[in-house]
Every structure is written in C-alpha cells, then in structure tokens.
Image (spheres, helix red, strand yellow):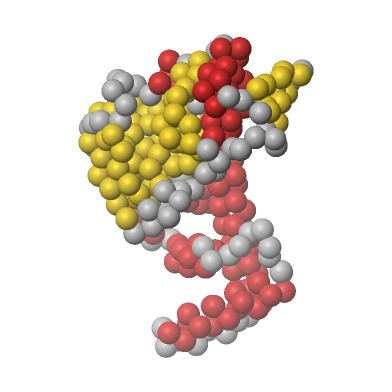
C-alpha cells in the first residue's frame, strides 16, 4: 500500500524534493518511468490486448537494443512489467477522469465561481470550464466551452484552451466567447495573448480579436464598457449573422426558435435584454420586419 501511495504521489506531482530523491533511488523507479513514457502513446478507448502485448514487447526489445544490452524476456520479468504497467495505466486513467473539476452554467443563467488560485470566472448561459483540481495552482490551465469573463489573479501564466484558439495571460480581465461558429476575445485590463494555429495576437485594454470565416484572426475595437454587456443581462451584436443572434436568444431564454420561413443569413446589429422575453423578441424581429408567434416553449418566425 505504501508503494501504491508513493506512485500515486509521483504521478500527481505531489512528492517533496526529499521524497522524489528517495523514490528515484529505488530499484523500480526507471521501470516505472519507462512504462509511463510508453503509456503516453496508448489510446485507452480502443485497446486490443493481444496487439498491445506484442507492441509492448517490441518496444521493450527495441529500447534494450538501443542500450546495447541483451535482456531475456522471462516470465518473472514479464509478470512484473505487466503488473506495474496495469497499475500505472489504472492510476493514470483514474487521475485523468476523477481529478477533473467541471463548472457550468445552464440555459437562462449566468454563474460566478472562484477558482483554486483565487481568480474569478463568470460563465454565460450554456457554458462550462474544466480543469485539474489538484494541480491548478501550479499549472493554471483550463478548457472553456462557451463564453466566460475572467478576472485573473496575478501569478504564473493563466491559460484558457478552446476548440478555436488559446489565450494566455498573467493577471488581467478578459472575455472569451468560444461557440460552434464564433470565437472572440476582448481585453478589459492588462494584456492578453491569443493564439490560433501559427498566429499570435497581443491585446491590450480596449482591444479585441475574432476568428473570421477564412480562419484568420482580425483585431476589433472593444465597446466602450468596463465589463461585457452580458454581465448586465444584455446581449449585443455588431453585424453578426442572424443565426448567431437566434442561437444566443435560445440559450438566454431556454426556448426553441423555428426560423425555416425566414432568411437567417442576414447580418444583424442590435441587442436584447436577457431577462425580458417579450421585449427581447421584439428587439430582434421588428428591425427586420419579421413576425413571430409564441406557442408553449417555441417561437415561430415568419415574414
């Protein structure tokens, strides 16, 4: 049990310097290290046991050849390696799946949270972040799906990963919107580095950036507000596709919009109040001369 706890602490980077030094002097340290290196190439979702065993034997044989040593693959050694390999794979799988913290906001709600490093985040409707519970203070990295406003406490680099791009800061306030067809970042304080593919853009207070249909980043001027409008229950759009407006409306009010009989490819400039459905639906239909009808949880649009 003691060995198991030591391995767990080692995998989770929780050993003290003295504990790590002692662990490195054990007979099995190099074996565990080699197994972890091999495990990085394994796809846990689709393992064929026979193929995996043959591949593992080949890797061990190849590794020993490089060191100009001949090691017989006897049953005792094979059992020891297999047992250790299974143990480490199990621990790694456990840490990956059960060490993750997910914070989210559902339809028609915003939620604020304090992160382990005392930074704060507010999530817009239908948004979530995921991060490591135990290592976040050392490695300030999280994944965002949706839209969030961050107020980051000064310290090491704070990284936000999204499907469309990555954001890195030290201590600042910024907003990230990462939806299916939209990626925007606005800086409200400090400096923000936004990366997409091989492009990197540095933003300062009052600047923003968005990902275009051509898959390139272009700079934007931030609206003259001290915080994103959605924090004050307002959604605003500047020449955005009407489909994006309708999608945000659905998230804010948890309704289904039927828009088959109208042109949703037009660009829309304007906004709506996130807490008043009647006022909001008029705000996005009257400027485009669109009629609407509310039936239960559906809103049917027509010309």
Q: Nearer the viewer, residue 243 or 22?
A: 243
Residue positioned 44% across, 66% down in the render: 30
Identify the residue at image location x=50%, y=26%: 124
Q: Where 235 falls versus 262 (above or below)? A: above
In this rendered view, identify the residue nearer to me: 127 or 225: 225
Going by the picture, which residue comes out furthest to the right? Answer: 296
Number of on-image labels: 0
Identify which residue is drawn at 63% across, 59% down. Answer: 44
Left or right for 295, reference 35: right
Residue 152 in view, yes or no: no
Between 170 and 192, the residue placed more toward the observer is 192
Query: x, y percentage for residue 182?
Result: 48, 41
Q: Is residue 86 left or right of residue 16?
A: right
Any part of residue 218 in sight: yes
The quadrant in which residue 59 appears is bottom right
Residue at 48% across / 82% down in the picture? 64
Vertical arrangement, residue 141 with respect to residue 256, above or below? below
Return the x and y of residue 84 as percentages of the image width and height. Answer: 59, 62
Expressed as whole percent of the image width and height from the top left, the position of residue 56 reads 60, 74
Name the image quarter holding the C terminus: top right
x, y percentage for residue 71? 52, 84
């Amino acid at each position: 049990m003691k060995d198991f706890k030591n391995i767990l602490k080692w995998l989770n980077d929780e050993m003290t310097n003295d504990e790590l030094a002692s662990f490195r002097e054990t007979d099995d340290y190099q074996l565990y290290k080699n197994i972890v290196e091999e495990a990085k190439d394994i796809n846990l979702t689709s393992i064929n046991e026979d193929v995996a065993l043959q591949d593992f034997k080949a890797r061990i044989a190849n590794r020993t050849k490089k060191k100009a040593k001949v090691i017989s693959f006897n049953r005792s050694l094979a059992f020891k390696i297999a047992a250790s390999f299974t143990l480490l794979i199990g621990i790694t799988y456990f840490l990956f799946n059960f060490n993750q913290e997910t914070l989210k906001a559902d339809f028609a709600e915003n939620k604020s949270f304090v992160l382990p490093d005392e930074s704060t985040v507010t999530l817009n409707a239908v948004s979530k972040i995921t991060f490591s519970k135990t290592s976040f203070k050392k490695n300030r990295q999280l994944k965002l799906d949706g839209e969030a406003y961050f107020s980051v406490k000064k310290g090491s680099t704070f990284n936000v990963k999204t499907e469309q791009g990555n954001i890195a800061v030290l201590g600042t306030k910024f907003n990230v919107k990462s939806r299916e067809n939209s990626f925007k970042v606005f800086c409200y304080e400090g400096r923000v580095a936004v990366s997409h593919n091989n492009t990197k853009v540095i933003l300062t207070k009052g600047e923003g950036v968005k990902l275009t249909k051509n898959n390139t980043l272009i700079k934007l001027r931030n609206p003259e507000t001290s915080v994103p409008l959605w924090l004050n229950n307002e959604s605003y759009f500047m020449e955005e596709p009407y489909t994006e407006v309708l999608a945000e409306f659905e998230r804010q009010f948890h309704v289904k919009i039927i828009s088959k009989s109208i042109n949703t490819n037009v660009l829309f400039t304007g906004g709506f109040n996130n807490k008043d459905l009647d006022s909001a639906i008029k705000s996005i239909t009257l400027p485009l001369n669109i009629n609407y009808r509310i039936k239960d949880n559906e809103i049917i649009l027509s010309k």
